[in-house]
Image (cartoon, rainbow, N blue to C red):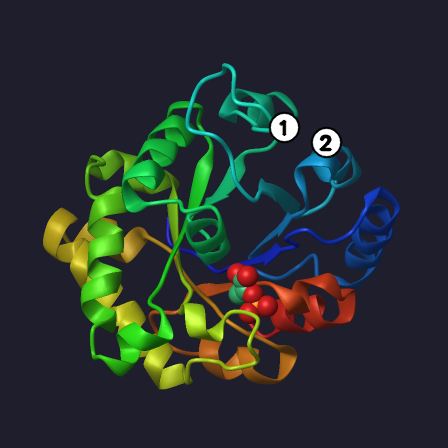
């Protein structure tokens, strides 16, 4: 069901001790009475301890990635079953850093989505155009294709476990943010694209997060847009005060 979500993607930051410190800080500073789902995504090696640490809190834990196979000779990889087994229920797939540095294609991501859903993981599916796409007026086409190729093989029921995260690549970690109107324009387009394929109910029920240099000082305006259901936060998720301010901006 559509609801507000703020998720923090910690990327390759924070060792075990730093993870514990940040989690303690977050437990102290994050609101416990707001109608917003709060999620943090530490690195693989700290997921298990994060799940235990956050057990009696309102903060959920997500993985930043997973492999599409059930198991096998894939050195260095992590399976869906391994995540579920330690109590992780959410996985981020398709982050632009996975797409660009690790060459993850829409076809591969469609495969990962299937494996994640089969194991009852919820998926935060990331997608968004690069700067050149926007400059060439191709941003709507690119986003539509990413959505179709990554997710449109699913049946309507599967969408109950999908969260979308629109993240224009040019805004990630750059300090450059889409204006609230640009975000709303794209989120509305995304919701309409989902509606065209699956109908109004599915489109109205999917949460669509914005990601790209969301900070305490711009979060409120972005989140106030009708089709923006919260944010996927990178840099600002690494400071408890900033992340708490962003959650409070919902
Ligand atoms: C991200 O990596 O998903 C992200 C949005 O990063 P940042 O907030 O640092 O731009």
**Furthest residue toward left:** 196
Whichever of callouts 2 and 1 sits on the residue coming sooner in the sequence is: 2
Residue 191 visible within the image: no
- For the point 56% across and 44% down, which residue is it? 64
Q: Are marks 2 and 1 in contact (CB under 8 Å)?
A: yes
In the foreground, 239 or 245: 239
- For the point 56% across and 25% down, which residue is it? 84
Tell me where residue 150 appears, x and y as whole percent: 28, 44
Residue 51 is marked as none
**Furthest residue toward top:** 72
Tell me where residue 154 appears, x and y as whole percent: 23, 36
Q: Which residue is mark 1?
A: 87
Residue 48 is marked as 2
User: Position of 13 compared to 189: left or right?
Assistant: right
The answer to whether residue 158 is above or below residue 188 is above
Q: Secondary structure at mark 2?
A: helix
Q: Quadrant of residue 31?
A: bottom right
User: Position of 90 compared to 194: left or right?
Assistant: right
The answer to whether residue 186 is above or below residue 82 is below
In the foreground, 103 or 116: 103
In the foreground, 70 or 227: 70
The answer to whether residue 44 is above or below residue 134 is above
Tell me where residue 211 appears, x and y as whole percent: 48, 66
User: Position of 211 compared to 242: left or right?
Assistant: left
Bin the neighbour count of mark 2 within 10 Å (Cα to Cα): few under 14, some 14-19, many 20 and up: some
Q: Quadrant of residue 245?
A: bottom right
Q: Is mark 2 within 8 Å of ligand 1?
A: no
């Amino acid at each position: 069901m559509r609801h507000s979500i703020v998720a923090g993607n910690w990327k390759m930051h924070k060792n075990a001790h730093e993870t514990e410190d940040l989690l303690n800080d977050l437990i102290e500073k994050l609101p416990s009475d707001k109608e917003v789902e709060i999620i943090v995504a530490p690195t693989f090696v700290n997921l298990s301890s994060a799940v235990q640490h956050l057990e009696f809190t309102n903060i959920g834990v997500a993985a930043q990635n997973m492999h599409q196979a059930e198991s096998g000779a894939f050195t260095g990889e992590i399976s869906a079953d391994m995540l579920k087994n330690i109590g992780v229920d959410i996985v981020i797939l398709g982050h632009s850093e996975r797409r660009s540095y690790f060459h993850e294609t829409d076809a591969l991501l469609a495969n990962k989505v299937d494996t994640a859903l089969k194991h009852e993981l919820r998926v935060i599916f990331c997608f968004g155009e690069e700067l050149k796409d926007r400059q060439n007026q191709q941003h709507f086409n690119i986003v539509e294709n990413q959505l179709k190729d990554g997710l449109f093989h699913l049946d309507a029921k599967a969408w109950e476990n999908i969260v979308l995260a629109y993240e224009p690549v040019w805004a990630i970690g750059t300090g450059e943010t889409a204006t609230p109107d640009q975000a709303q324009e794209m989120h509305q387009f995304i919701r309409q694209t989902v509606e065209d394929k699956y109908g109004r109910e599915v489109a109205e029920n999917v949460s669509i997060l914005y990601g790209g240099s969301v900070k305490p000082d711009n979060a409120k305006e972005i989140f106030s847009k009708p089709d923006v259901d919260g944010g996927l936060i990178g840099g600002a998720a690494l400071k408890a005060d900033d992340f708490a301010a962003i959650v409070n901006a919902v």
